[in-house]
């Protein structure tokens, strides 16, 4: 399948998620490169949104805009979600492999591009009074994304509705735990390094 | 020989001309304002110190911790020399006109005991908050005694109420408002006959949720040791021509450090910008000790934390900041009172016993004048001056907004959008955008529609051609 066809298929998934996700997993139509491409495109969309959303709805301090930050705030949570979800579902009889989770999550993010790009254009011609339309579209994009993520998780792991919801909520908790462990790890490493360094100083400075 | 002497004269005159200039680098403080994002932005200095005077220079002997100052409408400057219990009156040339030391009260000699506040009505009546004597004293302009108003008497006051009047203001109807020490109920109001009528403008209690949490979990004994939640105490007040009372509180956590009370005691201060008039937006906030209302709704608040004077316009936008703590001319040690007369600002320093006069620089008078026109609705005239302001300070957001609004009125919507965006005024930007959008659509709607319809038709035609070709192809294969 060519890239164009694969991308067209990702649109199909966004519009017909039940059918689309099933084929994604069981007809082997999902492609990791498409998922990663969507991830990259979402990051770029968010950078564009920060920079080019209309002045009326754009409250960002121009001097604080940083594209690297945007990258961090989208790619890191994405990976965190996938890792947490995978660690959880392997314990909870999920059928999805790590690659499946990556693909499902990546495809689910497509609405963020589909909604935000027109929204950025629209925001440049609306007034303060019409700005609620902008926020409406914005939240619509997010809800669509969560909906796709829900269907994706459900199909990939072959869960029931309730189990999917609990898994998704638990995934958020696990994300918190992972962040906590990460910070703990870094802080301990820092302590060890500074301990080693002071020890070294103590020894070398001693006559 | 002749040429040489001419050259010397020329050089000398150049030198003298150089001395005459009031150069900005000689200023003992830096000028700044806050932008939309709350960052301090450097700006030209609006006022520079022009002269100072102490008690010795005025010929009255040193002033002992003077606490209040009043610039009357006729140009006389009243200084309340609290430590010596007297009032010193200076004229515009800063010559001593009168010293009021004692007065004849019902046949007996009477004097002030550590008075803290002073007010002079338009008719020239002097009101003194005679703090330690617990009374308000009214004097005629020549210093003769008129009346004394003692502590308020009413059933609503608790038995423990201690009356120490600190500041006094009088409105046009003769009602007297007193700021009392340790009074949390608001301003103490007396009618023109000196009868207590009630409190006005009570500050609301402020507490933070953390304190509330600790208070709910602690025992009764612990709770009694804690500080009680009490409303903020006013520490100074001023009254404008319309009878609105401006008050200050010294509390650094308060978001309404300045209040503008209408006659029924409700705060009607306009806050147009992102930040309320609280002085510096740093972690260690300003604490206002005095406020002064000058013309056109412009008011100046004196901060004792850093010794600065913050000038706001009637919308609550910061116009400029002057002064600083220090020991040069133009800086203060312990500023306690601020007044202004004409285009001059006077600040009284308690520890140095000194008054400093500030005069507007080019920038300062441009801003004042532009703001005056702007607040009276003369946007076009104001815009010209705002342009001048921008030439001196390209970071002055008020100027961009002023010009933007004037362009909006003139129908230059696109330019107005640019200026309003620079001034960070989203509301008016949006208005300009709506107008510009309509204008743009009116002009180009026909063209865009023509293009759209042409595209639509060409797509339909192209599809039909493609289909007939396909059919022909199919027929050929079938044949």
Image: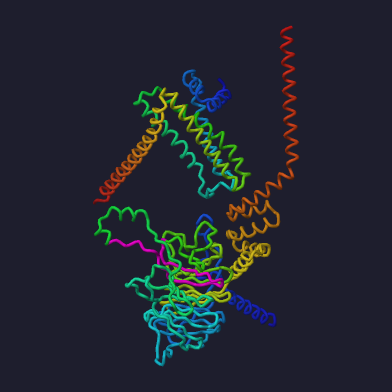
Against A114, residue B435 (above or below) is below
Q: Count numbered badges in the picture.
A: 0
Image spot of residue B262 (x, y percent):
51, 67
Q: Is residue B248 magenta?
A: yes
Q: How is the image coloured?
A: rainbow
Against B460, residue B183 (above or below) is below
Image spot of residue B361 (x, y percent):
58, 71
Against B149, residue B467 (above or below) is above
Which image quadrant: the N terminus of chain B? bottom right
Q: Is residue B26 visible?
A: no
Q: Is residue B52 magenta?
A: no
| Residue beneath the point at 50% across and 80% down | B120
Q: Is residue A29 left or right of residue A172?
A: right
Which image quadrant: the C terminus of chain B? top right
Q: Is residue A84 left or right of residue B457?
A: left
Q: Residue furthest front?
A: B155
Image spot of residue B196 (x, y percent):
43, 75
Where are the magenta residues, as a range?
A: B225-253
| Residue beneath the point at 39% across and 64% down | B231
Image quadrant assignment for residue B61: bottom left
Against B113, residue B379 (above or below) is above
Q: Is residue B110 visible?
A: yes
Q: Nearer the viewer, residue A11 or A207?
A: A11
Q: Nearer the viewer, residue B323 or B72?
A: B72
Q: Nearer the viewer, residue B457 or B45?
A: B457
Q: Residue furthest top?
A: B479
Image quadrant assignment for residue A168: top left
Q: Nearer the viewer, residue B413 or B265?
A: B265
């Amino acid at each position: 399948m060519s890239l164009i066809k694969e991308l067209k298929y990702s649109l199909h998934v966004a519009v017909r998620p039940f059918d689309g996700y099933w084929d994604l997993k069981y007809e082997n139509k999902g492609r990791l490169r498409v998922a990663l491409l969507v991830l990259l495109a979402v990051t770029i969309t968010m950078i564009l949104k920060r920079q080019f959303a209309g002045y009326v709805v754009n409250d960002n301090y121009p001097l604080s805009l940083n594209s690297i930050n945007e990258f961090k705030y989208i790619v890191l949570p994405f990976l965190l979600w996938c890792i947490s979800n995978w660690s959880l579902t392997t314990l909870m009889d999920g059928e999805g492999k790590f690659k499946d989770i990556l693909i499902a999550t990546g495809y689910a993010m497509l609405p963020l591009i589909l909604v935000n790009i027109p929204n950025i254009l629209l925001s440049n011609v609306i007034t303060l009074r019409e700005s609620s339309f902008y926020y409406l579209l914005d939240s619509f994009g997010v809800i669509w994304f969560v909906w796709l993520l829900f269907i994706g998780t459900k199909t990939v792991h072959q869960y029931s509705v309730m189990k999917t919801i609990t898994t998704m909520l638990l995934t958020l908790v696990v994300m918190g735990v992972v962040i906590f462990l990460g910070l703990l790890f870094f802080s301990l490493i820092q302590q060890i390094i500074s301990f080693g360094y002071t020890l070294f100083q103590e020894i070398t400075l001693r006559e | 020989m002749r040429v040489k002497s001419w050259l010397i004269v020329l050089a000398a005159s150049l030198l003298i001309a150089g001395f005459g200039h009031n150069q900005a680098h000689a200023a003992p403080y830096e000028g700044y304002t806050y932008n939309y994002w709350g960052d301090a932005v450097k700006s030209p200095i609006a006022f520079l110190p022009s002269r100072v005077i102490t008690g010795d220079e005025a010929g009255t002997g040193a002033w002992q911790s003077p606490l209040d100052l009043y610039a009357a409408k006729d140009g006389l400057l009243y200084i309340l020399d609290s430590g010596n219990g007297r009032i010193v009156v200076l004229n515009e040339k800063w010559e001593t006109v009168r010293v009021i030391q004692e007065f004849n009260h019902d046949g007996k000699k009477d004097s002030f005991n550590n008075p803290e506040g002073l007010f002079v009505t338009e008719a020239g009546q002097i009101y003194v908050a005679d703090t330690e004597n617990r009374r308000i004293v009214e004097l005629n302009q020549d210093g003769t005694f008129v009346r004394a108003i003692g502590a308020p008497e009413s059933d609503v006051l608790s038995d423990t109420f201690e009356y120490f009047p600190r500041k006094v203001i009088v409105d046009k109807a003769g009602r007297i408002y007193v700021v009392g020490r340790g009074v949390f109920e608001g301003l103490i109001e007396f009618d023109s006959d000196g009868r207590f009528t009630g409190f006005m403008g009570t500050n609301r209690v402020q507490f933070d949720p953390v304190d509330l949490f600790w208070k709910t979990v602690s025992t009764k004994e612990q709770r009694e040791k804690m500080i009680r939640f009490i409303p903020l105490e006013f520490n100074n007040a001023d009254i404008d021509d319309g009878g609105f009372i401006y008050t200050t509180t010294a509390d650094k956590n308060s978001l309404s450090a300045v209040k503008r009370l209408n006659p029924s005691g409700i705060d009607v201060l306009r806050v147009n910008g992102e930040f309320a008039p609280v002085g510096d937006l740093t972690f260690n906030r300003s604490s206002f000790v005095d406020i002064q209302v000058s013309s056109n709704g412009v008011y100046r608040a004196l901060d004792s934390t850093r010794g600065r004077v913050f000038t706001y316009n009637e919308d609550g936008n910061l116009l400029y900041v002057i002064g600083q703590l220090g020991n040069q001319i133009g800086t203060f040690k312990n500023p306690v009172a601020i007044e202004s007369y004409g285009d001059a600002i006077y600040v009284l320093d308690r520890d140095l016993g000194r008054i400093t006069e500030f005069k507007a620089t080019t920038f300062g008078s441009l801003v004042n004048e532009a703001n005056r026109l702007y607040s009276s609705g003369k946007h076009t005239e104001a815009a010209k001056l705002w342009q001048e302001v921008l030439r001196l300070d390209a970071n002055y957001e008020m100027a961009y907004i002023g010009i933007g609004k004037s362009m909006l009125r003139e129908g230059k919507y696109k330019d107005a959008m640019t200026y309003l965006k620079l001034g960070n005024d989203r509301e008016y930007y949006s208005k300009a955008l709506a107008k510009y959008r309509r204008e743009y659509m009116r002009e180009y709607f026909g063209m865009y529609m023509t293009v759209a319809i042409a595209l639509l038709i060409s797509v339909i035609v192209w599809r039909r051609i493609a289909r007939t070709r396909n059919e022909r192809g199919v027929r050929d294969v079938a044949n």
